[in-house]
Amino acid sequence: MTVMESVPSESDLERHFEETIGRDQRIEPRDWLPEGYRKTMIRQIAQHAHSEIIGMQPEGNWITRAPSLRRKAILLAKVQDEAGHGLYLYSAAETLGADRDELTEKLISGRQKYSSIFNYPTLTFADVGVIGWLVDGAAICNQVPLCRSSYGPYARAMIRICKEESFHQRQGYELLMTMMNGTQQQRDMVQDATNRFWWPSLMMFGPPDDDSPNTAQSMAWKIKRHTNDELRQRFVDMTVPQAEALGVTLPDPDLAWNVERGHYDFGRIDWAELKQVISGGGPCNAERMARRRQAHEDGAWVREAAAEHARKQRERAVAAATEEVGA
Ligand code: BYC
């Protein structure tokens, strides 16, 4: 008897995909998925990976000038964690058929984005603390829901990343607490860093919902679980009491508890600034990209050596297999 295997039609596959999403189950690399979903996932994961890698620069800038060996060791470990996050994320993108070299090429040629926040300078060591507190704090707010994202490899990478980001946030806060208990000059440095990073941190969540072209589809596919404005509000609500405990003032005169909404109201964000930074016109865009390009060029010999090593290993394996068969 011959068993005829029926090949599922495109609409069967699409229905299966929609049902999997509908049941809140994960899409895995072996599963069929619509081209739009694949493209969106690659876009988001690649941007996220690039952000982690470019995000090493502003803090890395302070490794050689950390005020003590303890602070240097902490900062080194944090920056190294960010490299690790970038690598998990590039690996997650590879499961969707995106080649890591191609993604790097797209970053350094300016065809793919990275987070706006990393285009601001780090002027004092207090910036290291404020990045941990506000930037990692915003990242956690944005990324905890992504642990439930519909694409399995991304969601799983996010679990580990969030654990590490949460550790980073605490180290930033602890550094700031120490500085706030120090001299007036140190307190002023913390306030100044907070003033410079507060608004750019709010911009990390992306444009407002009514100007966010990707949110509706990404929510429908359960890639995103909350809108940009929902997460931004969550971040503000979470951060105001932390600023009070620290003794710094958030630079927004309109920040006030709204009893009816049960949330903090906050002032108008300068969306023109976000657009400018995203389109390459931020204070450090050119510097960050030049540094990344240089690092890529400097690493060419490592990639060549690794490829040559892999080629020799393959050759040896083939020779050994041929010998075994011949023997
Ligand atoms: N900066 O329709 P929208 C970190 C782009 S790393 C630059 O709302 P979406 C850390 C957006 O990509 C932090 N671009 O988009 C590392 C889109 O452009 P395209 C990175 C931005 O995707 C080291 C366009 O604007 N975190 O945590 O639905 C040290 C329209 O936006 C930004 C992630 O990447 C921005 N701020 O939502 C410390 C998290 N905002 O592609 C910390 C994962 C928007 O259409 N990503 N754009 O040309 C996400 O959750 C979402 O992609 C976003 C944007 C919420 C960022």
Image: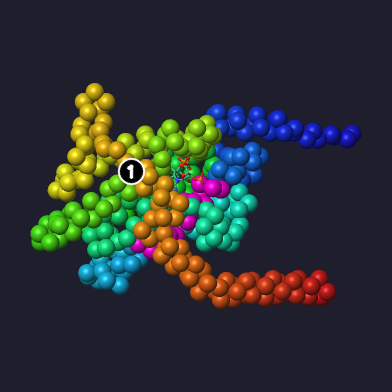
Asked whether 247 falls inside the magenta stretch, the response is: no
Which residue is at 84% across, 34% downward?
4
Percent from the top left, x then y, of residue 74? Answer: 29, 64
Vertical order, 108 against 95 (above or below) = below
Residue 47 forms part of the magenta stretch:
yes
Q: Is residue 23 above or below residue 71?
A: above
Estimate the x, y position of residue 143 in percent, counting from the top left.
Answer: 41, 44
Locate the C terminus and report the quarter of the image it occupies.
bottom right
Task: Between residue 196 and residue 126, name the one nearer to us.
Answer: 196
Residue 248 in percent (x, y) is at 16, 49
Whether the residue carrying mark 1 lies under 8 Å from ligand 1 is answered with no
Q: Locate the N terminus by quadrant.
A: top right
**Residue 51 seen from this side:** no
Tag 1 residue? 270
Kindly state the secondary structure of the residue where label 1 is placed.
loop
Q: Specify the principal SS of the magenta part.
A: helix
Residue ID at (78%, 75%)? 323
Q: Nearer the viewer, residue 325 or 121?
A: 121
Q: Amino acid at mark 1?
A: Asp
Q: Which residues are magenta?
A: 42-58
Q: Position of residue 199 (x, y in %)?
A: 30, 46
